[in-house]
Amino acid sequence: MLLSKSCIYGLRASLYLAYNKNDGYISIKEIAKELDISFHFLTKILQQLTAEGYMESYKGPNGGIKLSKKGLDSSLLDFVATIEGGELFTECVLGLPGCGSSVPCALHENWVSTRNGIVKMLQDATIQDLIKKKLDEGLRKKLNI
């Protein structure tokens, strides 16, 4: 799996929030329950996304979280980079130190073309794009949204 659980959960929670955006702020407990994710784990992920401005939080009895305009319009790559860090798509696929164009590992050339395709796919898509495509019922069920 290329993306960590943190990243996958962050993207799933973002899709959940976008799909339910008319509900306003949604409690993290509700999101965690609906997506079957640990509340504490999800809270840490959403704190990262909130700190970067992709989400807005509201404290209090009716508090919760929602996607910001920035969150709806940002690329999926922005979300991935926030959660995973910028090194995900620059490091050697095998984790070998010093691997690069001048001293490539055995998988370097294959990884570069695959990595570039993944980066382009994530750059070209936003949470809003995915929601606009009116996620079919099967995918919504798999994502629990």
Image: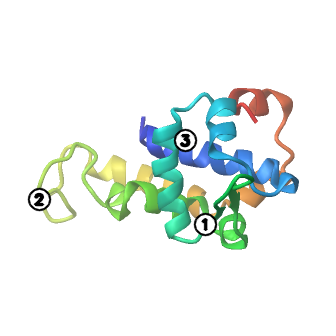
Residue occupying the point 50% across, 68% down:
51
130 vs 117, left or right, is: right
Kindly identify the amino acid type of the residue bearing the numbered disc 1: Tyr
Asked which quadrant contains residue 74, the reply is bottom right
C-alpha distance separating marks 3 and 2: 31 Å
Q: Is residue 96 above or below residue 50?
A: above
Residue occupying the point 46% across, 40% down:
41
Residue occupying the point 15% across, 65% down:
102
Q: Mark 3: few, some, or many residues within 10 Å (few <14, many ≥20)?
A: many
Check if mark 1's residue and mark 3's residue have beta carbons within 8 Å: no
Kindly identify the amino acid type of the residue bearing the numbered disc 3: Tyr
Dot 1 or dot 3, earlier in sequence: 3
Kindly identify the amino acid type of the residue bearing the numbered disc 2: Gly
**Residue 55 in the image, given as x and y percentages of width and height:** 63, 64
Residue position for label 2? 98
Q: Quadrant of the C terminus?
A: top right
Mark 2: secondary structure = loop
Dot 2 or dot 1, earlier in sequence: 1
Number of numbered markers = 3
Work out whether residue 20 or residue 131 is closer to the camera in this orientation and state it: 20
Residue occupying the point 75% across, 56% down:
25
Q: What mark, if any, has residue 9 been given in the picture? A: 3
**Residue 31 in the image, given as x and y percentages of width and height:** 67, 40
C-alpha distance separating marks 1 and 3: 15 Å
Residue position for label 1? 54
